[in-house]
Amino acid sequence: MTHRSFHPTPKTLMGPGPSDVHPRVLAALAQPTIGHLDPQFVSLMDDIKALLRYAFQTSNQLTLPLSAPGSAGMEAAFANLLEPGDKVIVCVNGVFGMRMSENVRRMGGEPVVVEDQWGKPVDPEKLADALAAHPDAKIVSFVHAETSTGVCSDVAQLCRLAKAAGCLTIVDAVTAVGGVELRVDDWQADVVYAGTQKCLSCPPGISLITFSDAAAARVKARKLPVQSWFLDVSLLMAYWEGEGARTYHHTAPVNAMYSLHEALLMLHEEGLENAWQRHHSMHELLVRGLSGLGINFVVDARHRLPQLNVVSVPDGVDEAAVRRSLLEDYNLEIGAGLGVFAGKVWRIGLMGYAARRENVQLCVSALGSCL
Ligand SMILES: *Cc1c(COP(=O)(O)O)cnc(C)c1O
């Protein structure tokens, strides 16, 4: 076998992530690698933290990127807040909620699972009932934007209920950030984590996380050290925050941080509200185009995520063959269904740089030809 350089065919990425990466972000990635404790890199780290606070709409001191994908953000949230034996109410309405309960279990916590049907948002009444039935619960966790079902849950209301019952909240905003309204401080969410490859349109591999003062105090008051050395935020902050001298913890993926910085900068330049509005308008354009093809949405209009459109595969259509044809004939990627939705739906992402008029038009016309 001869070995050659790898040159992927450029594709239009309209699945559940990764999404299309902006040329500016790709160019940022290709800049010279510098030392991870170089003063220039340290000042880049400071700027990334400030831009992250903007993206999350928070003034939380403890706000930083983690050198690992969205799943590491989830793991870090539970690893830092949870101590063995802690009861956690986990609201599950799709794949990522299920993963949260698995995290709780593996870390020696006791998950109380509150389930909602796939395609429905987390029901605040069910959470209220669970909080009343489990007054000893310490944490409530749920997913803001459930990528497996295309559903948006009401973060403000769920956090209000949890707070009133004395619980801290863990919110998965991996697909939410940059795509739909998210206000960490106003909504009083405690630990919120996100990813880079969904609506920030940055390559995968980094997660973003923020801790409220109450959550940071809980970490500080732990009886046992955080079970994960790599994800222990108190160690990470000595690297990301340390005044003057930063303590080596791990080597940050330097070039990946350039790309994160550029993506966050672009979001800042556009303005969060404008980015949310753009996702919404492109979603409406897609709804019009797909309804012309007789394709229906699975989720109620009130709870739909504009950035992740879950639609029913029309009767008699081979869903995998259509996806294959889109990829081979149009270089267009859309997503398949997961879990109970496998084989029944397509997931069409309009995330970040992919939320553009020309992408919507390509998707609608290519799907039209395949059907
Ligand atoms: C993609 C995603 C994750 C996991 O992120 P990875 O970068 O794939 O590890 C977690 N939660 C939600 C809601 C996601 O969409």
Image: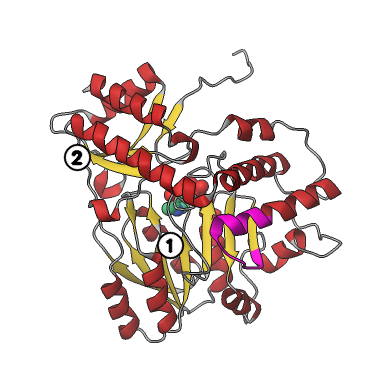
Give the answer, above or below, for where 191 lies relative to 249: below
Viewer-nearest residue: 288 or 322 = 288
Residue that carries the numbered disc 1 in the rendered image: 100
Question: Residue 223 is drawn in which quadrant?
Answer: bottom right
Q: How far apart are the two marked residues, 2 and 1, measured between alpha carbons? A: 30 Å
Q: Amino acid at mark 2?
A: Asn
For mark 1, give the secondary structure: helix
Is residue 38 at least partly visible in the picture? no
For mark 2, give the secondary structure: loop
Viewer-nearest residue: 302 or 105 = 302
Question: Residue 157 is drawn in which quadrant?
Answer: bottom left
- Residue 360 spot, x, y in % from top left: 36, 31
Mark sitting on residue 296: 2
232 left or right of 361 in image: right
- Farthest residue to the left: give it: 315
140 left or right of 293 in image: right
Viewer-nearest residue: 28 or 317 = 28
Q: Residue at x 67, y 56 (%)?
A: 49
